[in-house]
Amino acid sequence: MDQDNAAMNGVWSSLRSFLIAIGSALVTGGVITNTSPVYTWIMFASGAVLVVGPAAYGVFVNIKRVINSRKKVAEAVQAGINLTVSGQALAADGKTIVSINDGTTPPLPVTLQSAAQIVRDFAPATPAKAT
């Protein structure tokens, strides 16, 4: 899913145009008058969709970003555990980290909660520098 608010501008504009077209068609066809409450609500919705729509979408996008960020942490923790158990993890000095696990017992799956606890318990005090 594209989580870019700018990408949604066309959607909100199209929705506004659609609502205006509905209201206009209903008035032109004589179904409602331009003073009726239905017409007023359609026109109100067509204006509000440009304000409320992007705001609601922004909330949704930010919630999804937080959830995805937490999932990525859990995946990274699981990958680190799997790497260590398989005997392929390297220490800072370049030597292989030896796992106590003999390889016959797979590690437990990492959940969002256990990943957060593992990071709290075992993350270095200073983050690694990007290379």
Image (cartoon, rainbow, N blue to C red):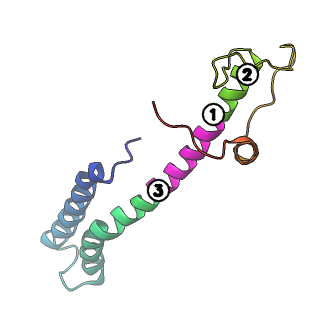
Residue 107, percent from left and from top = 80, 26
> Residue at position x 24%, y 77% from top?
39
Upstream in the sequence, badge 3 or badge 2?
3
Question: Mark 3, mark 2: which one is toward the viewer?
Answer: 2
Q: Give the residue number, with chain letter if any, for mark 2.
A: 84
Numbered disc 1: secondary structure: helix
> Residue at position x 30%, y 70% from top?
51
Residue 127, percent from left and from top = 57, 42
> Residue at position x 56%, y 37% from top?
128
Residue 31 magenta: no
Q: Residue furthest bottom?
A: 35
Which amino acid, mark 1? Glu
Q: Give the residue number, with chain letter if any, for mark 1.
A: 75
The residue stretch that appears in magenta: 60-75
- Residue nearer the viewer, 122 or 71: 122
Magenta region, mostly helix, strand or loop?
A: helix
Q: Position of 32 compared to 72: left or right?
A: left
Q: Which of the 4 quarters of the picture holds residue 101?
A: top right
Upstream in the sequence, badge 1 or badge 3?
3
The answer to whether residue 15 is above or below residue 51 is above
Counting other residues with Cα less than 10 Å from the Cα at mark 1, is it few (<14), some (14-19), or many (20 or more)? some
Numbered disc 2: secondary structure: helix
